[in-house]
Image (tube, grey):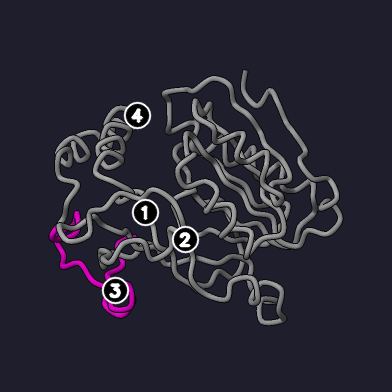
Amino acid sequence: MIGKIRKKINFLFKNKIRIVGLIRMRNEELILEDTLNSFSDIVDGIIVYDDASTDSSVEIAKKHPNVIEIIENEKWKKNRAEEETRHRQTLLDCAKKYKPEWIFYSDCDERFEGDIRDFLVSKNSNEVDGIRISLFDAYITENDKKQYESGKLYDFRKYFGPEKRDILMIWRNLPEVKFEGLDKREPVVKGTIVTRFYCQHYGKSLSVEHWEQTCDYYANSFPKYADKWKKRKGKAIHDSSDFNRKLESWEDVKRKAVKIN
């Protein structure tokens, strides 16, 4: 049953939230504690949508002091294009109950750089309706292939692809904002949208094993990406990006960014 259980973890937050964080997860026990800790530096409370995890992810989320609500989906559906949109809209609907000023959607494998919270609570954000954050993929390389086991994920890898995706992750809590369509990972937001801040994305680089699992996930769950991800199997260790560009250090990659969306 979809969204059968909703648990308010800490109702004391209810009237104090200015920024709500949203997260979808499935079997993220390896990185989840650090995800929730780092996200809590930016947001006042976190709402989690669990997509039928079979590990300890839900228990970790329940114990975290900044998780204010968990939506538990008990049955995993293979139609990911539909689910990507619906899950996010469910999270958005839930967030609006808390009447925040801002809503911030993040994936578990993303880590952020910049004074995001300071900007959102300052007068400088008064004319802004949405924020795109520049995201770069981290890569496993021959001299940096140790698998992630614990600790801070930010700056875990040495090298990143220069390909930059400016993704709408933060928006003002307005009634017209919504997720619609298939495989929609950004909401419909009108008004002034700016690009600020940076994101390190670790979806391809936690370990060689995780890379193989990622390839299988996209190949099996998203038909339009199947051929691309099948060809990436067995190629977790990189000497260039998936787009055949030179990998760069984190400081250099921001200067040498190539926008791809």
Relative to 80, is 89 on the left or the right? Answer: right
Q: Which image quadrant: the C terminus?
A: bottom left
Residue that mark 2 sits on:
111
Q: Secondary structure at mark 4?
A: helix
Label 3 crowd (10 A; few <14 / some 14-19 / many >=20): some
Rendered view: 14 above or below 73: below
Q: Nearer the viewer, residue 226 or 147?
A: 147
Residue 21 is situated, as x and y percent measured from the top left of the image, at 64, 54
Q: Quadrant of residue 42?
A: bottom right
Q: Which image quadrant: the N terminus?
A: top right
Do labels 1 and 2 touch, CB within 8 Å?
yes
Q: Secondary structure at mark 2?
A: strand
Residue 255 is situated, as x and y percent measured from the top left of the image, at 30, 80
Q: Quadrant of residue 92?
A: top right
Query: What amino acid is labelled 2 in the image?
Result: Arg
Rendered view: 213 above or below 162: above
Residue 179 is situated, as x and y percent measured from the top left of the image, at 57, 44
Q: Residue at x 54, y 20 (%)?
A: 75
Relative to 236, is 191 on the left or the right? Answer: right
Do labels 3 and 1 touch, CB within 8 Å?
no
Q: Secondary structure at mark 3?
A: helix
Q: Which badge, 4 or 1, comes first in the chain's sequence?
A: 1
Q: Nearer the viewer, residue 205 or 241?
A: 205
Q: Which badge, 4 or 2, comes first in the chain's sequence?
A: 2
Q: Nearer the viewer, residue 257 or 107?
A: 107
Q: Separation of disc 3 and disc 4 at Cα?
A: 31 Å
Rendered view: 25 above or below 256: above
Q: Nearer the viewer, mark 3 or mark 1?
A: 1
Q: Separation of disc 3 and disc 1 at Cα?
A: 15 Å
